[in-house]
Image: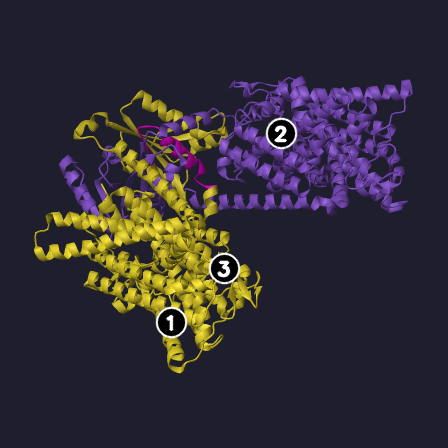
Chain colours: A yellow, B purple
């Protein structure tokens, strides 16, 4: 595999860097921008198209509302960016929206945000990959003809790369992102030059088409509803903005300040690109329809189901640069690449959020180990599986998938901003310094407006998109929420059960003596080692125990025991049914009954092997016996390992595994020993 | 499940008997006969049809060869029965053909027989169920219309019943078998009476049909070959004869003598039924064709693919009793039931043979526990899976499946008889008593003839059936053989590796002191128990070890440790990456490096839970840590269990599981402590 995936890996992610120090490298702003902005900036590849597409329902005349919708999106973007600049200053620990909601609004709000974010990560992968495939398809027809297959193929590729543990390099994030941003800006500038200075009339490939409105002459409430729906779709441009608030620890000092300026820069770039593309789309007469096969007319005839509707950004590029030109292909490739990078960020974010949730015991405890390979792999596979399912169900159609996308984003925006308002209220209660108070009041005002505005958008999104697919996202959130609260409830119940009593009362029932039993089947090295170890840890009574399933073998064992003069008494239990477990359990229970204050220590020689199939051939009886012994109170079970030669192989494999590092370290920054008071919600 | 399967269970197997003593009950001959004979006697339900079917290739005129073929089958049956009567006397331990071949011809021959028997068990299920469905279908058309579905359904039902552990009762085997035998005899007698005394002309449903010969006017070698093929097919009547030789321990004393007479009785019944059915088929003009759709002509027109060819036994019953009469339906039901019982015997035989093979280390060691539930379940599921696959591939067509069947049977017949010849030769070398010598010479003559005759049949079967499907059975045998020898080779290599050295030289590298480490995450009951147990087993050094993944939690742990005054030093390791495993492994390795003669004993508090999903939530880090620690030489790992309340549930389940008994105990008899010299092949 390593060879096969090397080429696409270098193209997509860049050469894997082996330095163990990379995770500790702090990001300068010029690198931090592309690292965190690939997700939000890539949104402009699909958001403008979604706006036009919804407006087309009322006919092409409704397109003249698009600048107003763009303005609304810009205002919203500024609001969200301004709000998150406050978050970044107040919570520099990288906990993000989950931390803000958990700390200020309590665990239920935190868990809601977490569920929304988990759903969002899945949709980031599904939407970005689908949109990337559509953009790539505008240059390479094969890709769009096998859309679902290509999309799933790319998800599988990303999954394999991430499972293998490819390290991200900030610099290699930078190239496609900067190429993409530069390409869009050049396109806007060149388009404006051709249109305004030279006076060219540019024509998009769809400029001659007509649109058959699904609803002719919409007015009043219906029109408002449609405009709100178009605005909701445009809000897709905001997805990913919150990413920086998770990544503050990765910035150079002053961390919060640098993160805030990067956030502002990203916002400025995003709105310029968004507006520029919408403007060019208007100037070049791009036509987008929700059902192009039916509603897009070429000389009065519907284009039919064979027609592929290219994304707005590629149609505009075709009009400005010319279809198939170098710049056109470069921009299509850069757009696709940035979208794939955006999907890749979800591969890092999903397990990271999982580890934070595990720390708060909403997910299995062992996931909390940061960068733990197993946890990481499980997360990656779950994420990829869910994304593939969605891509498959929705035919890799980014327009349909976007309907699911925006709900989760705005749930976390809104709850995070409400949390911030509470945060400032709490601090204002204790803060005495007038200058600090003034800053806090200002921040609170920004967050209040942010909470209000994003909340409003959430309502609009829910109202206009619920039946279009938002319910699927809500269902996903409910499932995550239910599972995680059940897990937390279980852990809480167990914690209560095992809480240590105060005082030394426990000592009264403590065993007073220990009776050790070494299980023996034959006299061989593993048995001798187990005997030696058992003798070493001195117990009050030590005996060897063997189960007789074959009289001849038992006789041979007894003889060898005496011949070797092993100075441990050998006890033999008869097992007429050739059972192993039951006689031992019965014997141990009998010992406990005789002297209830004795603890029993059972030594089991265990083979350490190198291949999975060898496990099927060894230790199975021992494992089962151990499983049953653990149910017997007052018993402890000691495995005395004997390393077979083949175990060397497994040791090598384990060493290699240890060299593995979870991808995404660049975005996370060095390990933060975050102060307790900000991490909240833990006991 | 228990409710749903109760009704068919009572019908098929009878009420489950709870008595623990049942396995110890010895069988009188009148019960032993049906218990062991359901398999061989049920063969007469399909064997006569197979003979006619093959003959029909040369046209209906070839049917006049069928009495000769019946005679050949009868001679073969007498030979095999006579030979196995010798086996039963010489090997009363129930090891059967595997034991005979293994002891006398060496492990390779034994393994070949074992592979053949394993394949045969699979085919017994596939053939018997398919044939049973066909017989049932002659009375209930629905069944034969959904043949594959019904066959798989019955296999699944049998599998569930066997997995649940239904106890066989000898008496409930008896009823369907005796009804079947009585039914067939009444049919033969009544048919003979109607035909010979009354002078009725009876007509089978197919008596008016004509057969289009696939090869007109066969003669010379081609005809001989066809007759040999028909004979091979008739040999299907012999399948299952060897069953009694596995079941000698289940007989009342004198075991061998009773088994031998039962064998003789069974042979007599089988040949009478076989010949009677063939005779009636001739008298009632039954027509069977290999491809009925094409070659069976009704008034000169092919009957087409919609036609269902009923088994000979049901066609004869229709002619003698009349189609749809009470006796007809009763016989069809009894036939189907006996065939299903025959399939059920494979469910007992397969895991039993598995346990014998495991004892000789050809299969994973843990399977050798007799009646072990897990081993039994794995065997059952493997058997059922393979049978379902065959039924599905071959469309539940008993004729096609029988092509695969007979090879394995004759491989074990032949090897077993050759083994017996060797057995007598060996004994004749030492035996001095003239009377005993005379008996042995006589037995040797019988076995020699048996070996020769069954070997000849094996060659005929291979020659005439190889391309018809016997190659599939051979392939199955090769796969079993290869797997089992690989497993044995592995065990032998390991046994050599772990063989204890002679003398006390081992002691020189033995550790001299033990350093105990108790892993601690928090101060709670499981930790306190682990500490108490560790203190109890006195070691040279004892410390508690905790991994710091969160400074606040670590501080709290330290404080509680001091507050409680726990008199064990607490060592805390920093883990900046929130890893658990690596720091502990490194620490342990460091200790080993400092004092290589110290053994390290690691105590891990372990939660004992009741549900599988709770396992996902607990102990995962501990398990992984344990897996890694075992690779480190000089370390032993002690699990100190803490039983959570939910573990009570699992304890209950375990208790219930303990009450489980592997089905088939009736056929096996009480546990035999067989003397070493006869079990052979072991070291």
- Residue B344's tag is 2
For image coordinates 22% across by 46% down, the residue present is A104
* Mark 3 or 2, closer to the camera: 3
> What crowding class fits label 3: few (fewer than 14 Cα within 10 Å), some (14-19), or many (20 or more)?
many
- The verdict on a common chain for dots 2 and 1 is no
Residues at circles 2 and 1 in contact by the CB criterion of under 8 Å: no
Q: What element carries label 1?
A: helix
CA gap, disc 3 to disc 2?
A: 69 Å
- Residue A184's tag is 1
Residues at circles 3 and 2 in contact by the CB criterion of under 8 Å: no
Q: What element carries label 2?
A: helix
Nearest to the observer: residue A510 or residue A399:
A399
Which residues are the magenta region?
A: A617-637
For image coordinates 43% across by 39% down, the residue present is A619
- The verdict on a common chain for dots 1 and 3 is yes
Residue with the mark numbered 3: A213
- Judged left or right of residue A333, residue A639 is left
- Judged left or right of residue B259, residue B641 is left
In percent of width and height, residue A562 lies at 39, 32
For image coordinates 75% across by 32% down, the residue present is B46
* Mark 2 or 1, closer to the camera: 1
Looking at the image, tell me whether mark 1 or mark 3 is earlier in sequence order.
Answer: 1
Q: Is residue B324 above or below residue B683?
A: above
- Residue B589 appears anywhere in the view: no
Total number of numbered discs in the rendering: 3
């Amino acid at each position: 595999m390593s060879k096969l995936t090397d080429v696409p890996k270098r193209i997509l992610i860049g050469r894997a860097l082996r330095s163990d120090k990379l995770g500790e490298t702090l990001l300068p702003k010029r690198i931090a921008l592309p690292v965190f902005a690939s997700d939000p900036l890539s949104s402009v590849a699909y958001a403008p198209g979604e706006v036009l597409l919804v407006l087309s329902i009322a006919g092409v005349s409704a397109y003249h509302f698009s600048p107003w919708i763009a303005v609304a999106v810009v205002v919203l973007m500024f609001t969200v960016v301004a709000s998150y600049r406050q978050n970044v200053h107040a919570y520099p620990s990288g906990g993000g929206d989950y931390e803000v909601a958990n700390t200020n609004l309590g665990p239920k709000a935190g868990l809601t945000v977490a569920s929304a974010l988990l759903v969002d990560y899945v949709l980031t992968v599904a939407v970005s990959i689908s949109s990337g495939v559509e953009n790539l398809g505008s240059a390479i027809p094969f890709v769009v003809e096998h859309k679902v297959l290509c999309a799933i193929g790319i998800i599988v590729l990303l999954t394999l790369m991430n499972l293998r543990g490819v390290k991200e390099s900030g610099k290699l994030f930078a190239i496609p992102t900067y190429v993409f941003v530069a390409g869009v800006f050049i396109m806007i500038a060149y388009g404006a030059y051709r249109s305004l200075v030279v006076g060219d009339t540019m024509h998009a490939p769809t400029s001659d088409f007509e649109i058959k409105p699904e609803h002719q002459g919409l007015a009043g409430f219906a029109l408002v509803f449609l405009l709100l729906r178009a605005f909701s779709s445009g809000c897709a441009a905001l997805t990913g903005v919150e990413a920086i608030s998770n990544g503050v620890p990765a910035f150079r000092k002053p961390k919060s300040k640098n993160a805030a300026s990067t956030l502002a820069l990203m916002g400025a770039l995003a709105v310029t690109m968004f507006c520029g593309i919408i403007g060019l789309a208007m100037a070049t007469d791009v036509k987008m329809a929700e059902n192009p096969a039916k509603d897009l007319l070429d000389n009065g005839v519907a284009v039919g189901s064979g027609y592929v509707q290219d994304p707005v950004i590629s149609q505009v590029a075709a009009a400005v640069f010319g279809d198939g030109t170098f710049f056109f292909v470069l921009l299509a490739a850069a757009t696709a690449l940035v979208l794939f990078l955006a999907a890749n960020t979800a591969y890092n974010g999903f397990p990271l959020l999982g580890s934070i949730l595990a720390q708060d015991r909403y997910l299995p405890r062992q996931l909390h180990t940061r960068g733990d390979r197993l946890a990481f792999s499980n997360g990656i596979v779950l994420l990829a599986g869910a994304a593939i399912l969605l891509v498959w169900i929705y035919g890799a159609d980014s327009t349909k998938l976007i309907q699911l996308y925006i709900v989760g984003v705005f749930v976390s925006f809104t709850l995070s901003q409400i949390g911030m308002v509470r945060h400032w209220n709490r601090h204002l209660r204790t803060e005495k310094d007038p200058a600090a108070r003034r800053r806090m009041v200002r921040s609170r005002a920004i967050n209040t407006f942010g909470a209000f505005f994003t909340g409003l958008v959430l309502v609009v999104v829910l109202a206009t998109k619920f039946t279009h697919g938002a319910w699927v996202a809500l269902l996903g959130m409910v499932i995550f929420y239910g599972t995680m609260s059940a897990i937390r409830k279980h852990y809480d119940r167990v914690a209560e059960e095992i809480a240590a009593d105060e005082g030394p009362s426990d000592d009264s029932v403590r065993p007073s003596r220990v009776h050790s039993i070494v299980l023996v089947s034959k006299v061989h090295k593993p048995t001798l080692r187990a005997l030696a170890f058992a003798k070493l840890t001195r117990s009050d009574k030590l005996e060897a125990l063997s189960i007789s399933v074959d009289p001849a073998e038992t006789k041979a064992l007894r003889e060898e025991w005496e011949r070797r003069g092993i100075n441990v008494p050998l006890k033999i239990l008869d097992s007429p049914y050739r059972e192993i477990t039951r006689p031992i359990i019965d014997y141990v229970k009998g010992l406990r009954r005789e002297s209830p204050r004795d603890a029993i220590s059972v030594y089991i020689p265990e083979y350490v092997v190198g291949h999975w199939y060898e496990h099927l051939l060894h230790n199975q009886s021992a494992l089962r016996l151990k499983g049953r012994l653990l149910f017997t109170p007052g018993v402890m079970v000691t495995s005395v390992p004997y390393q077979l030669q083949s175990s060397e192989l497994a040791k090598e494999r384990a060493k290699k595994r240890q060299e593995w590092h979870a991808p995404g370290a660049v975005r996370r920054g060095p390990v933060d020993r975050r102060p307790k008071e900000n991490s909240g919600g833990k006991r």
